[in-house]
Image (tube, helix red, strand yellow):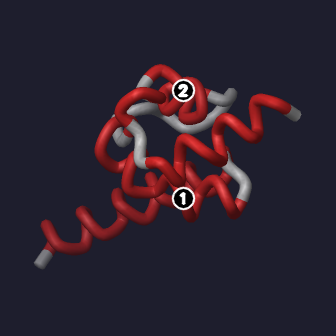
Amino acid sequence: MLRIIVTAALLGASTAGFAQELTAAQRNACTGDYEKYCKSVTPGGGRIIACLSKEIDRLSPACKKVLLAAEKK
């Protein structure tokens, strides 16, 4: 039971940190890619966006689209 609680808390914390780094559109489009490629990245200072940008060739089309659009702004 303790293991489940700790796991849930860690997942919630990583999701909360992820939410603070990205816009709602980016978060919706990139959550799967974040979990796959950047889950170990400590949120803050644009580190998650930087991580996703490094993996741009491997990202889902939706995530790639919102990140590239954000770069153009």
Q: In the rendered view, would you say 61 is above or below 52?
A: below
Corner quadrant of residue 32? bottom left
Most distant residue in the right direction: 73
Residue 55 spot, x, y in % from top left: 42, 27
**Amino acid at pointer 2:** Ser
Rounded to the nearest angstrom, the CA distance separating label 1 from label 2 is 14 Å
Q: Residue at x 57, y 24 (%)?
A: 50
Marks 1 and 2, the one that precedes in the sequence: 1
Q: Residue at x 30, y 69 (%)?
A: 8
Q: Which mark is residue 29?
A: 1
Q: In the rendered view, would you say 16 is above or below 59?
A: below
Which one is nearer the viewer's eye here, 62 or 22?
62
Residue 17 spot, x, y in % from top left: 56, 50
Q: Secondary structure at mark 2?
A: helix
**Amino acid at pointer 1:** Ala
Q: In the rendered view, would you say 1 is above or below 6?
A: below
Q: Residue at x 68, y 28 (%)?
A: 45
Image quarter (top left, top right, bottom left or bottom right) of the N terminus:
bottom left
Q: Secondary structure at mark 1?
A: helix
Q: Which mark is residue 53?
A: 2
Q: Is residue 17 left or right of residue 71?
A: left
Residue 31 spot, x, y in % from top left: 46, 57
Q: Is residue 3 left or right of residue 6?
A: left
Mark 2: few, some, or many residues within 10 Å (few <14, many ≥20)? Answer: some
Image quarter (top left, top right, bottom left or bottom right) of the C terminus:
top right
